[in-house]
Image (spheres, grey):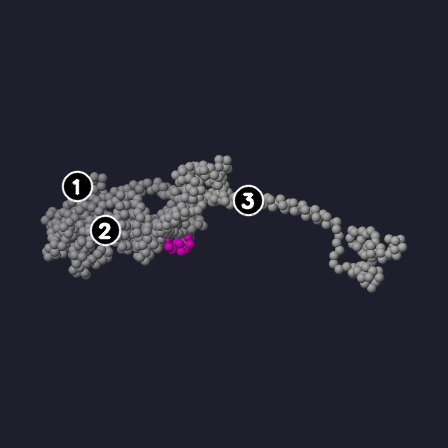
Amino acid sequence: MRKKYKILIIGAGKGGTALLELFRDDESVEIVGVADRDMNAPGIKLAETLGIEVSDDYTGFMGRKAIDEIINVTGSDDVQKELMADKPDEVDVLSGHGSEFLWRLVDKHKEAEVEFERLNETMLRLGEDFDENISIITESCGKALGGAAAFYNKTSEKGLCTAAQWQAPSGYSTELFPEGHLCFSIMKKAKKNELTVLSDLEKTGYAETDPGIRDFGWKAYAGCPVCFENECIGSLCVLFRESSELTEREKHMLRIFADIISREEKRAKALGDLKDSEERYRKLVEGVEHPIFVLDREGRYHFMNGTARHALGVFKGEYMGRTMWDFFPKEVADRQMSSVREAMDTGNRLIRETQAPVQGEVRWFQTTLQPLSDASGNCERVLGIAMDTTKRKAAEAAVEKTKNFLDKIINSVADPIFVKDRDHRWIVLNDAYCRFMGYPREDLIGRSDHDYFPKQEADVFWEKDELVFRTREENINEERFTDSRGEVHTIITKKSLYVDEEGRDILVGIIRDITALKDSQEEMQKQAKKFSLIFENSKDAILWVDPDSGKVINCNRAAENLLERGREEIVGESYKLFHPTEKGDEYEKIFRRHVQQGGESSLEGEVLTSSGQVKHVLMSSTTVDLGDQKIMQGIFHDITARKNIEAEKERQSRALDKINRELKWKIEELEAAMSHIKKLEGLVPICANCKKMRLEESDPRDPVSWISMEKYISERTEASFTHGLCPECVKKMYGDAMKKKGK
């Protein structure tokens, strides 16, 4: 992109205003400021309207603004001297004759713009009617040259006639006698674009031979031949009431208007050819896919092509005499006819986009209405072409929906997004950026980093922007970002370049706030140190094993003690080296299953020390993600002492079980013996004298309730009685007999 030329204008009068008008739309020039002691000067007001900085003291711009050129249009030598003394060495000052020349150049430029506008206005007025067009051209030429009258005279079957006229005097005849007529003479000898300018007609012979000059008192003449296909067919001339000389600009204008008429003549011939093939083109119109129709001022149809007839459901000829209101609802017909009459009244082609019901469906149409003038120039009909834009409108709606969707997408992105132009001004911001900045979008759009950030931060942003603009390469940078609350964030900014449809460089950036991440990293470093201390000082042995190779990649001091090996003897070796050989396959299967399934597992196992001692351990393993790699972490708790205690308990338990079994056998034998014994328990009623026993729950007064002891016991137990006598009873019963026998 070309660098803009930066200028400072001193003086806001006519000259300064003209310079502002000249440079306001010039993309190669940037007006950095306008200075004038009179703050009510017209140039000051215009500069304020254009958003250009103004001041009553030009020194305020020195050093603060980058300036390539100072233009002094004050006309003051004192101001010029002050400027030469105050300006930076690298800045030029244009003043005096140079400034006046530039001023006059601006005036010439403005005159050229006026001429261009006049020509443009003329061209815009031109329509389809040839006679009307050449009348417009003739009128415009006469006005542009400041003449009293203007004519376009051309050859005809009778010799010479006036095809167009402007301000023709009363009594002027359009049928001209060629001999002696000034225009006819010019037409016979002139070449294309060769002008004839006569500033004093009274001194020429045409004052006698040309009836127009003789009868209407014209004093000066300017004419240009109108040529068509290398043949002069007419003359465009302007006549003046006073002697007059044309400027070069006016001569150039006359040639241009003559050339325009020449082109109209060419177009008229083409139209004539078109009329010759009207039927062929009518057939072509019939086959056009868009409805074409002709309406008069009352809304009556005079023509419909096949597409229009099909759309309205009529046959050829059936539409004649029918109006728009016969085919459309009143509100639709009223709206359409308003546009039709506007086209007729203004004579301008109109393009309107409206909705209309067609065959039961409301559709969108872009209708072009072209006024049709009759031979007298009256416009009473309009040619309409209705292009069905329903699909396009649907596509536009889809595009708008997509745009809204994209807006929602960009605004739903949590990361701040910004877009800058080449001047580092924000032109697009998402909601996240506005929230991050702490300002509403309308305050930010059109502003730059230096308007909101501390200078040190803004300078960094600006520098990285320029790097992307210059190298056209993506840039990613870690930066500091201070929001509206004064909070400082650490951010990662990714910037890339985009070139729009007009070739302008656009910078697109996205911000990721990593403040929390940075804090987290610092916390992680602290945790890593803490973990390292815990890892090294853990009472349990810890091994880190690569899950793919099965080799140890780290261990702690407790592992060295458990395995009776130094760290250098452990790291790099397979974990299987530290288990009994006969357990290798079993542990390998467990290890691989855990690698595949992940999670945590715990089991008892054995490790082998360097001295060959087998130690019992409780092994806990888990998969750990270290970020750059995954590892298997094994924690080994020495349970050898516990296992010995458990073995002793097991031995004692087995001995106790044996004693319990033997005791059980003895109890079972005793229970078997006791099962044969019936017992009498509680208080048993017995006679104190005869020793009879009373039946349970019987009346003690009833003699039947009392039975002998032998019967009572034998009925209630398995005991039986044998009878005999004790010594005392023998003595008591048989004492006397025993005495007699001498015993």
Q: x and y percent of residue 372 in the render?
A: 32, 49
Q: Name the residue under label 1.
A: 191
Is 575 in front, or is 77?
Answer: 575
Q: Determine whether 171 is above or below 275 in the image.
A: below
Q: Residue at x 41, y 55 (%)?
A: 330
Instruction: Give SS at disc 3.
Output: helix
Question: Helix or strand or loop: what does disc 2 sit on?
Answer: loop
Q: Is residue 739 visible?
A: yes
Amino acid at dot 3: Glu
**Residues drawn in magenta:** 328-340
**Residue 224 against residue 588 in the figure, above or below:** below
Give the image location of residue 251, x and y in percent: 16, 47
Q: Does the magenta stretch include residue 333?
A: yes
In the drawing, does residue 45 fall left or right of residue 326? left
Q: Which of marks 1 and 2 is in front?
A: 2
Quadrant in the picture for residue 483: bottom left
Please report the residue visible at 47 percent of the width from the left and 44 percent of the height from the top. 638
Q: Quadrant of the N terminus?
A: top left
Q: Which of marks 1 and 2 is nearer the N terminus?
A: 2
**Numbered tag placed on residue 648 in the rendering:** 3
Tell me which numbered mark, 3 or 1, is placed earlier along the sequence: 1
As drawn, the residue found furthest toward the front would be 742
Neighbour tally class for label 2: few under 14, some 14-19, many 20 plus, Cα within 10 Å: few
Q: Can see residue 341?
A: no
Alpha-carbon span between mark 2 and mark 3: 104 Å
Closer to the chain start, of discs 2 and 3, is 2
Question: In the image, residue 14 lies at what x, y percent?
Answer: 16, 56
Disc 2 marks which residue?
A: 25
Task: Judge whether residue 291 is colored magenta.
Answer: no
Give the amino acid at mark 1: Lys
Q: Is mark 1 on a helix, strand or loop?
A: loop
